[in-house]
Image (cartoon, coloured by chain):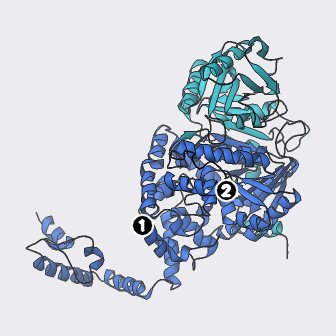
Amino acid sequence: MESTAGTFKENAKQALADAKLRDALAKLSDGFPVKRRDAVARLPEFDDLCDQATAIKEHVLENLGFYLEAFEARVTEAGGTVHWCRSAAEARTTILRICKQAGAKTVTKSKSMISEEIAINEHLETHDVEPVETDLGEYIIQLRHEPPSHIIAPAIHLTKDQIADTFREKHSHLDAARNLEEPETLLEEARGELRRKFIAADVGLTGANMLVAETGSIVLVTNEGNADLTYSLPKTHIAIASLEKIVPTLEDATTILRVLARSATGQDMSVYTTFCTGPKRAQDLDGPEDFHVVLLDNGRTKMLGTEFHDMLRCIRCGACLNHCPIYKAVGGHAYGWVYSGPMGAVLIPNLIGLDEAHHLPNASTLCGKCEEVCPMRIPLPRMLRSWRKKQFEQEKTSFVSRTALKAWAALARRPWLYRLAVAAPIAVLALLGREKGRFRWLPLGGGWTSLRDMPAPEGGTFISRWHKERQP
Amino acid sequence: MSDARTDILAAVKAATPGTDDEARQRLADHRAGVIPARGRLGDKARVDLFIREAERVNATVARASSMAGVPREVARFLAKNNLPMNLKIAPDISGKTIPWTEQTLLSVEEGRADGSETAGVSRAFAGVAETGTLVLLSGPGNPTTLSFLPPTHVVVVAASEIAGDYEQIWGRLRAENADEESEAGARFMPRNVNWITGPSRTADIEQTLLLGAHGPQRLHIVIVDE
């Protein structure tokens, strides 16, 4: 998709002024994080499982070539086909070719971030194939021509009134008097529409949460069951996945599944976890006759062995988004590309370049909550700092901030100068503010005082108090 | 232009230190990781945990003393919920295994689902007490569509098939479904292994939990004690 990451600051300002978005995002804090905490509390082994899940993916990345070839061999044995694609463009071409060979008019889709990454919907549409998103959230944003704002809850930025308005506009062939006031009636409306699409579809396009090298299986995780209707009704099933989604064995997949849903939605296990292996067997009464796996690189191999290597362990649970103070303030669209939150701020510059995404690594308070809740132990704050360091080294930060940082570094390296530079203004401010105890305005301090008063300093610097109070 | 497969594998192998031996051994061993202690229970307590966990995720559970008692439990469930007495059943649990005709109110048909059914009945391969999860295998006798198209899904599982954890199910599947002709040893997987934990749901609208998003609104589990 087209990036707007370059205008993050403007995007964020707009988001902060959007009252409906704030209403929608306000519900996030009491939702996923609370449920995650409860689910983790119910499983004493959770931390051990996270350590193991981390070790599994680390081992895979060290042996990625072997596992990719093993996976391909098993898929082929089972009667499926693996398509290797270096870039988004190659993946789009491959998927369109398979759709055309299948004579497809309609393609049902279950939620896949990789499909957003390669912008497959636009490509299919321009070649007369209709893509239909079937995850409820994705369906809603497809009708609105919006990108997802959260990796597991794509329509989290919308209120039910906005969704009702969208349905009224787009489902215009239906009775105008129908009730669309409650989430229940909205779901019923979407379910009815999508049932027809599921049954009419010629190709089902899914993502994959994991690829199992041992068996050549793809793993699909949903709560709605839409992935299962997507692959089981059409004649052709295409699964698209980036190549770091590999795990060695079914047991390894199981370990990761035990931390995935708990970290994502706070469920012990998502409702539907499916292992698909090859096309339908000859005697089966249902299932696809053709099975394709599109394996996408799109920048992943370039991350191997770099300071961003650990990011390839990500299982896209969304926990870092749900706990991020910046994400919860501005929502996902402000980040301007497919991913968002801390994982997006690390990944996006890797995939579309630091020039376009230069604001994103700075859209963080580095509070560390993301790393704390990450089940794959990804050091997100360290990687955000790596990007900042690169920006400084490549002179991509502004002249003012570079000069300020250099001045600060000069002070910090000379303690006597630092003490003087701090003590003098404190003494002056303490003197000026001794009556009211606060300032309503300060020169150079407008950013602070426009919203709140600045308290007047009392009792000198920390170091002077330390010296005074340490005396017996 | 060289082909994508060669390029990707070359880039991957240049950047990764692994020797294949360790990885090959790992695939052969398929060793289990940490298994939560909560499923490790005696027979009765394990089935009780399965029921508690399944009910926690909005499934309903009934017990029958034998396969012969299943039709009565299913009819009772349908009547209680005011649902039509029509069933589409998996061939694996046809009249040969379960005497459906003894419940004269039930109208029973065998086969896959096409979207017109009101209730589907499947046979589970196993249950997992850890999370109240059912494990279903696709096959000629157990079509996948029965689990997802009808608004009501009934699943029959034997108490003796309820394990403590998922790893035991992989072990059973490898042992029971092994294909001796396959060198790769991976042919024990059917087209679909479906883990089902409660009825379909979504929270995509304002994070409000709603049941029956695309899959079934109701999941009813009949445990057969035998």
Chain identity of mark 2 = A
Residue B15 seen in render: yes
Residue A315 seen in render: no
Identity of the residue drawn at 18% across and 83% down: A424
- In front: label 2 or label 1: 1
Write down the residue under mark 2. A112
Which quadrant holds the C terminus of chain A? bottom left
Q: Is residue A285 above or below residue A446?
A: above
Chain identity of mark 1 = A
Which quadrant holds the N terminus of chain A? bottom right
Q: Which element carries disc 2, helix, strand or loop?
A: loop
Q: Which chain is cyan?
A: B
Q: Which chain is blue?
A: A
Identity of the residue drawn at 78% across and 43% down: A232
Q: Which mark is residue A390?
A: none
Q: Is residue A204 left or right of residue B73?
A: right
The amino acid at mark 2 is Ser
Write down the residue under mark 1. A16
